[in-house]
Amino acid sequence: MKFAIQSKGDDSSNTLMHRIKMYLLDFDLIYDEDQPDIVISVGGDGTLLYAFHRYSSRLDKTAFVGIHTGHLGFYADWVPEEIEKLVIAIAKTPFQVIEYPLLEVIIRYQNGGRESKYLALNESTVKNIEATLVMDVEIRGEHFERFRGDGLCVSTPSGSTAYNKALGGAIIHPSISAFQVTEMASINNRVFRTIGSPLVLPGHHTCMLKPVNQTDFHITIDHLTLLHKDVKSIQYRISDKKIRFARFRPFPFWKRVHDSFISDE
Ligand code: NAD
């Protein structure tokens, strides 16, 4: 089996990375940064997000596992003290794979022709560069509302515990193929109206955002923020690709939610 390790880059993550690499090489696994069967992320959720984007062109061939060197992560759920156990499991046992849905984002531009396509593991957000964001929101090709406010967040089920949660969105179990649209400070008065509640759309629906007057936006894809100019539309739906996590022990989603947000006792 071929493996790669993605480190957060700080001293403790780098030290752990070198130890894991030595152990796995001792077990005759092959270090291959280009075509790994498994990627071990050492750091935090941000490190796993980075690893996901680095290997997003080979998601059907690569599984991910995360170790956290800081606080408990949602994707990075192994602790450094467990690495001997994890290394033996990687080297000796065929691992179980758990798949989570991903968000497909397609940005089209005024000048036609080209489009940009992205995959998000957590979410994509849209914010205006200055002033209020004004977007027409279409669901399955039908006008739903004209949104005015700070921005919109479109998240995956596994991303529902991240930015989405801070915006009052629901937590969605990642076995459900769905995505969620949440508002950031919408303007609601007698003139302007938005739904006000987070929307959960099934995996086969599409949500399209169409700018009304503005054309340039800050669009985030997980940890990446990019300025897109001359935007005509932003299309969201659940991708037919999935992220594959290597599971070596049960750590159910609701237990992770509990341990992250309620208490780890
Ligand atoms: P960061 O360093 O700002 O960390 C953000 C925090 O989000 C970390 O504590 C991380 O553990 C946590 N996190 C990431 N994914 C999570 C998930 N799926 N469930 C629960 N917690 C999660 O930034 P980063 O590490 O580069 O992560 C980028 C993510 O930060 C974005 O995808 C977004 O979800 C999140 N974010 C959150 C807010 C907010 O809560 N107000 C604002 C901006 C970005």
Image: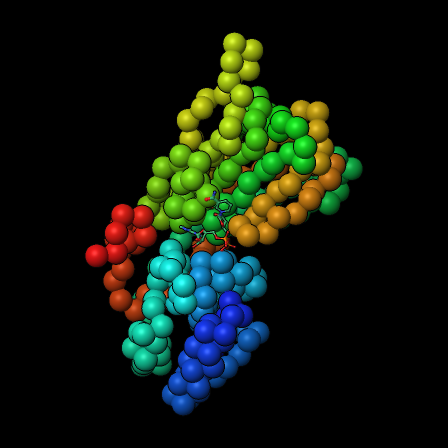
Q: Is residue 137 visible?
A: yes
x and y percent of residue 177 in the render?
A: 39, 44
Q: Relative to 51, is 94 above or below?
A: below
Residue closer to the observer: 69 or 249: 69
How many numbered marks are there?
0
Q: Residue furthest right?
A: 111
Q: Is residue 239 visible?
A: no
Q: How is the image coloured?
A: rainbow
Horizontally, residue 256 falls left or right of residue 69, namely left
Q: Which x, y percent locates residue 83?
A: 34, 76
Q: Is the residue 32 above or below the residue 261 in the image?
A: below
Residue in the image at 59% along x and 52% along y: 224
Residue at the spot 67% in from the left edge and 24% down from the top edge: 212
Hey, which residue is sitting farthest front in the picture?
A: 11
At which x and y percent is residue 142?
Answer: 54, 23
Quadrant of the image for the N terminus? Answer: bottom left
Q: What's the residue at 45%, 55% (across, down)?
A: 242
Above or below — where is 169 with respect to 88?
above
- Residue 148: % across, % down: 58, 24
Camera-side residue of 251 and 237: 251
Residue extending furthest toward the top: 190
Q: Quadrant of the C terminus?
A: bottom left
Residue at 64% across, 34% down: 128
Is residue 9 shown left or right of residue 75? right
Q: Quadrant of residue 22?
A: bottom left
